[in-house]
Amino acid sequence: VGDMVHVKLQPYRHTSLSIHRHLKLHSKYYGPFRVLEKIGQIVYILLLPVGCQLHPTFYISQLKKHIGPDAVPNPKLPLLDADGHILIQPEALLERKLIPRV
């Protein structure tokens, strides 16, 4: 309790979290998140961000202990819309190329 852990999200199970068609391109772990409570031997409750649509209870096999400083630049989970699909927004437009049509 009080430790920091990373959560393994499984895109083949959580279809609302699928960004890419190829599972190799997914982030395997998100976090770190603080452990609030241990239930029994194998279940943990995590402190997830406000507005997260995931249940905060995770089986021990979906968690990986965070090693290093507690401060991480971006511990956010992907944003979801009302249907549970990931909202993808570009941060900036780097280049623009127009192809003239004949």
Image (cartoon, helix red, strand yellow):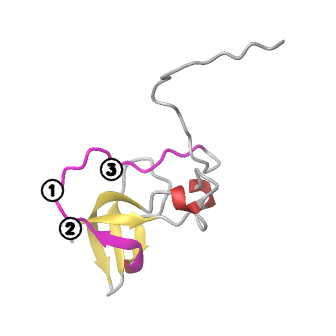
Residue 80 is situated, as x and y percent measured from the top left of the image, at 54, 46
Q: Which residue is drawn at 61% across and 45% down?
A: 82
Q: What element carries label 3?
A: loop
Crowd class of label 2 (few under 14; some 14 to 19; many from 20; radius 10 Å)? some
The mark found on residue 75 in the picture is 3
Residue 39 is situated, as x and y percent measured from the top left of the image, at 33, 80
- In this rendering, would 91 be left or right of 67? right
The earlier-in-sequence mark between 1 and 3 is: 1
Q: In which quarter of the image is residue 102?
A: top right
Give the residue at mark 2. 3
- In this rendering, would 10 be left or right of 63? right
Give the residue at mark 1. 69
Residue 38 is situated, as x and y percent measured from the top left of the image, at 29, 77
For the residue marked with disc 3, what is the amino acid? Pro
For the residue marked with disc 2, what is the amino acid? Asp
Crowd class of label 1 (few under 14; some 14 to 19; many from 20; radius 10 Å)? few
Q: Quadrant of residue 5?
A: bottom left
Image height check: is 54 above or below 13? above
Q: Which residue is drawn at 43% across and 51% down?
A: 77
**Real-space Cα distance between discs 2 and 1?**
11 Å
Residue 63 on the magenta segment: yes
Q: Quadrant of the N terminus?
A: bottom left
Q: Are marks 3 and 2 in contact (CB under 8 Å)?
A: no
**Real-space Cα distance between discs 3 and 2?**
15 Å
For the residue marked with disc 1, what is the amino acid? Pro
Q: What element carries label 1?
A: loop
Give 66 or 101, whichever is nearer the viewer.
Answer: 101
What stretch of residues is rendered in magenta? 61-81
